[in-house]
Amino acid sequence: NNPFKAKEQINMGFDLNSIKPKDPNNDYFRNSVWSWRPLWNFVAENCDNVLTYRDVKMGSYNDGYKISKSKAIKIANKLDDLVNSGEVAQYARDYEKAEKGSVVDENGETLPIKYPFSVDNVLDFSRFCRNSGGFEIC
């Protein structure tokens, strides 16, 4: 039995706000809970020399945790390197093959779900990180 109900989960998300953005038109990044989990897991796995255990853990909650400007830039650099090398595309293909799951809605029906992972989302997050001047996860 899945303790989460689809209706509750669909509306949940992670809103990241820039602390000191270079470009005020790119000062916000949002992912649904479904998209944020795999993105943040990927970042945590590949930026383990940048992020502390606390950063990784708190990045899984949307309660205002802050990532510094220097860490945000290091994350962007690492993600850009992984995109340019083709590693993100390969990860996305492998992820697509492996991802399966379901959720129980408010009527007790089992619905298929997908935690999406894409190169485009990684690129959007990288651009946001580079511009953010540090960010807050809300």
Image (spheres, grey):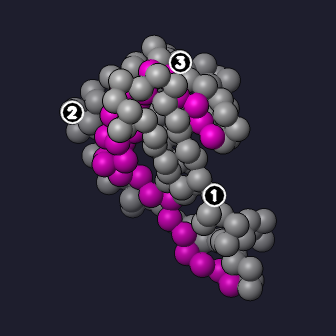
Q: Given contact means CB atoms under 8 Å apart, are the residues at marks 1 and 2 in contact?
A: no
Residue pointed to by mark 1:
12
Q: Which quadrant is home to the N terminus?
A: bottom right
On the question of residue 78 being in view, the answer is no
In x, y percent, where is residue 18? 49, 30
The secondary element bearing badge 3 is classed as: loop
Q: CA distance from mark 1 to mark 2?
A: 31 Å
Q: Which quadrant is home to the C terminus?
A: top right
Judge by depth and name the residue closer to the eye, 86 or 25.
Answer: 25
Say which amino acid is labelled 3. Ser
108 vs 86: above or below: below
Residue pointed to by mark 3:
68
11 vs 31: above or below: below
Say which amino acid is labelled 2. Asn
Look at the image and give the residue range highlighted in magenta.
109-138
Q: Confirm whether the magenta stretch covers residue 134.
A: yes
Residue pointed to by mark 2:
84
On the question of residue 40 being in view, the answer is yes
